[in-house]
Image: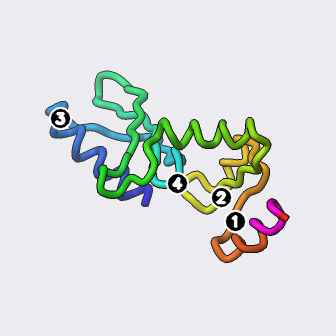
Amino acid sequence: MTDAVRDGLIRFLTIRWARPVEIPWLSVTSAGARRLNVLFDADDGEQRHKLVVTAIPNANIELTPIVLEAQTIKTAEAAGVPVALVAFGPEGPGVARLRPDALLARFDDLPALAADLLL
């Protein structure tokens, strides 16, 4: 996926800036269950630009707006409700930095993880 993202960004920025662009560094990170951030450096031959692209599904796909998703997590934490995060998304186990109560490594593990957290 990273190569396809890099190639698409290079094509877009080369057309947009009307000059060749290189992307020497790129990192894809999670921004929620259905969103992702792409952090990258774009070099246009004159300057290195530090940029971020956030991919958000359109209204037909998005189930929970970003603001409500973050608010839901904070509300759950404030109420003492355990929060589990998916560790097999774009950021992988890096979501552990958010210090959830549990990490879901594989979808097949969900029933056991839910039982552990809720029972």
Task: Give the Cα separation between the discs numbered 4 and 3.
Answer: 30 Å
Amino acid marked by disc 2: Ala
Magenta span includes 116: yes
Is the C-beta separation of discs 1 and 2 under 8 Å? yes
Task: Give the Cα separation between the discs numbered 3 and 1.
Answer: 39 Å
Q: Earlier in the sequence, mark 4 or mark 1?
A: 4
Colouring chosen for the image of the structure: rainbow
Of 54 and 71, nearer the camera is: 71
Which residue bears the numbered disc 2? Answer: 87
Task: Give the Cα separation between the discs numbered 3 and 2.
Answer: 35 Å
What numbered label is drawn on residue 75?
A: none
Amino acid marked by disc 1: Ala
Which residue bears the numbered disc 3? Answer: 16
User: Which residue is at a point 52% across and 54% down the rendered structure image?
Assistant: 33
Which residue bears the numbered disc 1? Answer: 105
* Residue 92: image location, x then y, percent: 62, 56
The C terminus: image quadrant: bottom right
Q: Is 49 on the left or on the right of 27, as rendered?
A: left
Q: Earlier in the sequence, mark 3 or mark 1?
A: 3
Judge the density around disc 1: few (<14), some (14-19), many (≥20) Cα neighbours within 10 Å.
some
Residue 87 appears in which quarter of the rendering? Answer: bottom right
* Residue 53: image location, x then y, percent: 38, 38
Of 103 and 70, nearer the camera is: 70
Q: Is 41 on the left or on the right of 98, as rendered?
A: left
Q: Is residue 11 above or below residue 60?
A: above
Secondary structure beneath disc 2?
Answer: loop
Residue interval drawn in magenta: 114-118
